[in-house]
Image: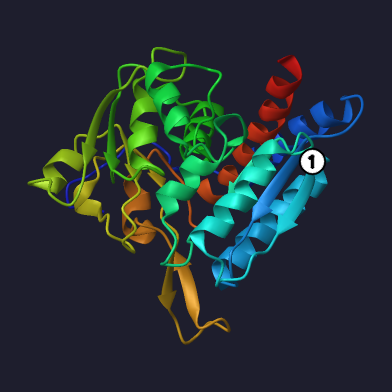
Amino acid sequence: MRPGVNPTFIMEIIDGNQIAAAIAAELKAEVAALAGRKPCIALVRVGDDPASVSYVKKKEKTAEEIGVTSRIILPPVSITQDALFKLLDELNADSAVDGILVQSPLPKHIDEVAVFRRVAPEKDVDGFNTLNLGKVAQEDETGFVACTPAGIMELLIRSGVDLKGKHVVVLGRSLIVGKPVALLALQKKAGANATVTVCHSATANLPAITRQADVLIAAIGRPEFVTAEMVKPGAIVIDVGINRVPDASKKSGYRLTGDVNFAAVSPLCAKITPVPGGVGPMTVAMLMKNTVKAFRLAHAR
């Protein structure tokens, strides 16, 4: 804690596992009430990247718990971009598939953005298609919001945080997190209506800006980058980072850490998300929520 700081608040750790479990329970009840076939998601994993294998298994397990059908598709790492496009075209045309997720990262010879654009917008439950990003900007509720930004907003709302009138500082400008979460916080709707600043690698005097944040969202992909000097006492800190840092004391050889130095920053915060167990579980929960939404929209057409 910085010298002279005497906070009058009690720090609260936001439990992403608990909130994600509540969403999963709601979805399970919703799916159980559906007549006929259940929502179906196709999970496409190219190659055997260890992190990707783990993420897809988690998504498959969550789908099973909720009652969503998952179709696991495992093209070899050598697959060409054209062959992957053909596979996605087949899934786009398959009426039994409601949502499609292509697990990133993809092999270097494949253009990720082109792949995301190839997924039909109405099945783009990952929210990366250009049309869905545009719908977020236009506040069109028929679009799909990228799962991590959607999860961040849900975490805040279910933790009793109303962004109206608050200064939100987003650290990172990626299409996966930074830009969409900034757009969501700006929206004219309950839980949003914030004033938003987006910071990035070219931002001058970064600590002076992050210290203005009522809510700081760290999504920069650098282990423990955010220090106590960058945080205003009483701020709410959402740590999006999941970084593997070498650690010989761990059986795996590494430990997981966020973009925030939790030990140094947490005493200053009114609320903070841990890593792991914060934003991560919400991403999977929102993927399932988008899949059920895609199912309902398809049946409404």
Q: How many marks?
A: 1
Location of the N terminus (image quadrant): bottom left
Does residue 258 appear anywhere in the picture?
A: yes
Above or below 163: residue 255? below
Q: Position of residue 12 (x, y in %)?
A: 48, 42
User: Front-most of 188 and 237?
Assistant: 188
Residue drawn at (70%, 58%), measured in percent from left and top? 73
Above or below 227: residue 18? above
Which quadrant of the view contains residue 287?
A: top right
Colouring used for the render? rainbow
Within 10 angstroms of label 1, few (less than 14), some, or many (20 or more) residues? many
The residue most toward the right is 36
Identify the amino acid type marked 1: Val
Which quadrant of the view contains residue 180?
A: top left
User: Front-most of 240 and 55?
Assistant: 55
Q: Position of residue 106 (x, y in %)?
A: 48, 62
User: Front-most of 123 and 251?
Assistant: 123
Residue drawn at (71%, 15%), measured in percent from left and top? 301
Label 1: which residue?
68
Q: Position of residue 295 (x, y in %)?
A: 73, 28
Left or right of 57 in this view: 102: left
Q: Position of residue 279 (x, y in %)?
A: 51, 46
Left or right of 75 in this view: 35: right
The residue most toward the left is 204
Left or right of 260 in this view: 289: right
The residue most toward the bottom is 248
Does residue 235 appear anywhere in the picture?
A: no
- Secondary structure of the residue carrying tag 1 is loop
User: Front-most of 153 and 237?
Assistant: 153
Which quadrant of the view contains residue 96?
A: top right
